Image: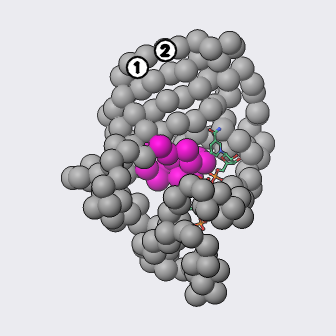
Amino acid sequence: MVNSKPKITLSAAITLDGKIGQKNKHIVLSRIIKTCKRVPTIIVVSELASKSNLNRLQKSPLDVIVCGKNQVNITKLLSILSKRKIKTILLEGGGTLNRSFLKQNLIDEMIIALTPYVLGSKNTIDLFEGISFPELKMKLPLKLKNVKKTGSEIILNYKF
Ligand SMILES: NC(=O)c1ccc[n+]([C@@H]2O[C@H](COP(=O)([O-])OP(=O)(O)OC[C@H]3O[C@@H](n4cnc5c(N)ncnc54)[C@H](OP(=O)(O)O)[C@@H]3O)[C@@H](O)[C@H]2O)c1
């Protein structure tokens, strides 16, 4: 666990078969660029980001942090955000990003909405994409702190 890091809450909607979406559906950056005029926005990239892309980003009122060589270095990023007095983070990642945080034992709390759908296994993304048991360093089982029913969904709140 990072010494002083923001509190991280993972939030996700999952299907009954533990899926969170379909492969190759990433967030569209242009939407973030549109909203950054109204919402203070930080974009974090690794050193792999090209100069031209960085220049394009820096034309918008965005705060761009370059952190990590080939991939964003999450622990370094958290310490930068901590120094900027950011105390809480809502992690609404896809399965790959969720996995990176879980593997490094960085998640403090999880809010999972269990939805009455099934997506199946073809071209779908797991809540923690590609993780297997021997990789997990975190303490299991998690502590279930709250359960709420809203319509046909169940909201589960776990603490680590
Ligand atoms: N149901 C929900 O609550 C929910 C929420 C969010 C998203 N989703 C769904 O999740 C799916 C996307 O998931 P995904 O697993 O494909 O992608 P993802 O987790 O959204 O994003 C992964 C990308 O993040 C980048 N990345 C940067 N730094 C990283 C780091 N340190 N560790 C790991 N990744 C890092 C990587 O880009 P590079 O390859 O450039 O390194 C990687 O490709 C979509 O279908 C979306 O709709 C569902």
Q: Position of residue 72 (x, y in %)?
A: 47, 67
Q: Position of residue 100 (x, y in %)?
A: 47, 53
Please state which of residues 56 and 134 is positioned toward the viewer in this rendering: 56
Residue visible at 40% across and 34% down?
109
Residue 121 in the figure: left or right of residue 65: right
The local crowd at label 1, few if under 14, some if 14 to 19, many if 20 or more residues have their Cα within 10 Å, is few
Residue that carries the numbered disc 2 in the rendered image: 147
Mark 2 or 1: the one toward you = 2
Please state which of residues 133 and 50 is positioned toward the viewer in this rendering: 50
Q: Seen from this angle, which residue lies furthest front?
A: 38
Q: Position of residue 42 (x, y in %)?
A: 50, 63
Residue visible at 61% across and 62% down?
37
Q: CA distance from mark 2 to mark 1?
A: 8 Å
Residue visible at 68% across and 12% down?
151
* Tag 2 near tag 1, CB within 8 Å: yes
| Vertical side of 48 occupied by 94: above or below | above
Q: Position of residue 68 (x, y in %)?
A: 42, 73
Q: Secondary structure at mark 2?
A: strand
Q: Quadrant of ligand 1?
A: bottom right
Q: Which mark is residue 144?
A: 1
What stretch of residues is rendered in magenta?
Answer: 90-102
Q: Secondary structure at mark 1?
A: strand
Residue 95 highlighted magenta (yes or no): yes
- Residue 129 appears anywhere in the view: no
| Vertical side of 1 occupied by 144: above or below | above
